[in-house]
Image (tube, rainbow, N blue to C red):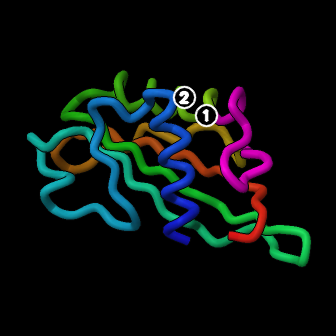
């Protein structure tokens, strides 16, 4: 599924959405969540969807952790990702992005860093 995450990240990079943000896959490390760390987006596959001979529907989950007390920047990025995927709804081997729910958050880490979440289904060809 790493190829899928690379495709989604590349699609969002093309829109300039991750400028100034660190992007990681599957897990946040202590250095990613420290109070003085740069804002970070964690992407992971999230199960869900179905697979058949015509294609797959894997889900991608985003956890967006802003800088300390930076609710606005993190919330804005979460909304921007959602809107970008609605407006630019195809990518290499992905025939549609489906937003599964509105942006979730903010919640906060113990050190005051805000976190938002977004879940997206990727209607894909053979990932």
Image spot of residue 76 (x, y percent):
45, 24
Image spot of residue 106 (x, y percent):
42, 37
Please give left or right for residue 60 compared with residue 53 in the image: left
From the image, tell me which residue sits under label 2. Answer: 79
Please give left or right for residue 27 compared with residue 62 in the image: left
Sort mark 1 into few (<14), some (14-19) or many (20+) by Cα contacts within 10 Å: many
Q: Residue furthest left?
A: 36
Assign the N terminus to one quadrant of the image.
bottom right
Assign the C terminus to one quadrant of the image.
bottom right
Q: Please state the extent of the stretch shown in magenta in the rendering.
A: 85-98
Res 45 → quadrant: bottom right
Residue at x 73% of width, y 37% of height: 89
Q: Which residue is at the front of the view, 94 or 111?
A: 94
Can you say whether 69 is above or below 30 in the image? Answer: above
Residue at x 44% of width, y 30% of height: 17
Q: Is 89 covered by the magenta stretch? A: yes
Sort mark 2 into few (<14), some (14-19) or many (20+) by Cα contacts within 10 Å: some
Query: Dots 1 and 2: beta carbons under 8 Å?
Result: yes
User: Which numbered circle lies on residue 82?
Assistant: 1
Residue at x 20% of width, y 50% of height: 110
């Amino acid at each position: 599924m790493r190829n899928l995450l690379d495709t989604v990240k590349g699609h969002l990079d093309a829109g300039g959405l991750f400028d100034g943000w660190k992007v990681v896959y599957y897990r946040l490390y202590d250095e990613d969540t420290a109070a003085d760390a740069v804002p970070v987006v964690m992407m992971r596959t999230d199960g869900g969807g179905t697979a058949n001979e015509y294609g797959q529907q894997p889900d991608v989950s985003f956890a967006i952790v802003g800088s300390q007390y930076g609710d606005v920047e993190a919330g804005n990025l979460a909304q921007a990702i959602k809107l970008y995927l609605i407006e630019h709804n195809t990518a290499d081997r992905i025939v549609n992005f489906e937003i599964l729910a509105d942006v979730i958050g903010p919640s906060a880490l113990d050190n005051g860093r805000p976190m938002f979440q977004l879940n997206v289904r990727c209607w894909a060809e053979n990932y």
